[in-house]
Image (spheres, rainbow, N blue to C red):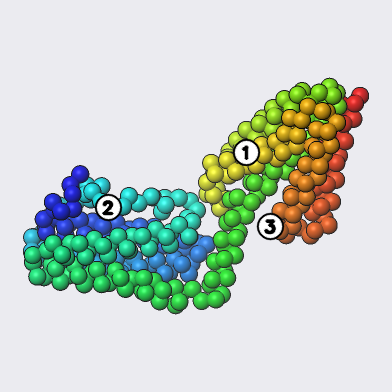
Amino acid sequence: MRTFDSLNEKEVLALAITLEEEHERVYADYVEGLRKDFPASAAVFQGMQEEEAGHRRRLIELYRKKFGEHIPLVRRQDVKGLIHQEPIWLQEPLDLDKIRTASSTAEAEMRRFYLSAAERSQDASIRQLLNDLAEEEISHAHRAEDLTAQKLDQPAMQQEAEASRRLFLLQVVQPGLAGLMDGSVSTLAPLFAAAFATHSSWDALAVGLAASLGAGISMGFAEALSDDGALTGRGRPLLRGLVCGIMTTLGGIGHTLPYLIHDFRTATAVAVSVVLVELGIIATIRHKFMGTPPIPAVLQVVIGGLLVFATGVLIGSS
């Protein structure tokens, strides 16, 4: 890698052209990725893409006048000190908050780049253009605000907020809730069957841990393999699988850990209390995020949980 100070003016201009082209193409990817769910924000980045395209054209025009037609390939990774950009534009679906943060970071980097390059330049026309571009990068923040004000009116902001909420439900809440319900309810029967059959906290703990971890692995794979998110918009399968698997395991672990208590009766009393808390949390999530009315949310979860709990107790006591 070269240091920035070791670059001559020809190489600095070539690097600036590469960076502006990179930003232009990244903004184009943002536009394409946001168009469906966040059309107003896509329009904002469309405007920023056009700004970067203008910068690139001006740099190329000056380069041709000074150095001819051939532009050497000087890239970000060839020069020390430039920020490594995470390829969030390759993620599906795109995270709007991450995109806005990344674009602000990129604009700040280019501003510093142009100011540093202008200070080193000995050519008046190159120095002038670099200073002009540095000033324009400073004004890009205001330009982005203007574009946002033009494109993101109140109805558009409400629409995008609803789209963000919908994506959060599809990608995180739904797989997490499915895992939590499965982990909390499905492990009740084996745990309490083992507990009442053996009256041993250690045996109940071993069965509960095995059931929780096994259910977590099973549910995680099932969710990850259910669909790739391309048609449903449910996001990356790996993320959904991890969320579902972890929440499934946590759902079962919660009422298993009380059996670390040596006394069987005390451990069981604590475990039953934890189960009631878990069912209440599930009902609350269903009401808050899924729109289920409070009473049906409680009845559906509690009745199902009590039936599974009773099944485990009956089998363990027989």
Residue 104 makes an appearance in the image: yes
Tell me which numbered mark, 3 or 2, is placed earlier along the sequence. 2
In this rendering, the answer to whether 42 lies above or below 153 is above
Mark linked to residue 245: 1
Give the residue number, with chain letter if any, for mark 2.
82
Q: Residue at x 36, y 74 (%)?
A: 143
**Figure check: 176 above or below 120:** above
* Kind of residue sitting beneath label 1: Gly
Instruction: Classify the position of the C terminus by image quarter.
Output: top right
- Is 278 displayed left or right of 145 in the figure? right
Q: Earlier in the sequence, mark 2 or mark 1?
A: 2
Depth-wise, is mark 3 or mark 2 nearer the camera?
2
Most foreground residue, 161 or 47: 161
Contact flag, marks 3 and 2 (Cβ < 8 Å): no
Q: Secondary structure at mark 1?
A: helix
Query: Gap between marks 1 and 3, in whole Å?
Result: 20 Å
Q: Disc number at residue 289?
A: 3
Question: How far apart are the two marked residues, 3 and 2, measured between alpha carbons?
Answer: 42 Å
Looking at marks 1 and 3 on the same chain, the residue that comes earlier in the sequence is marked by 1
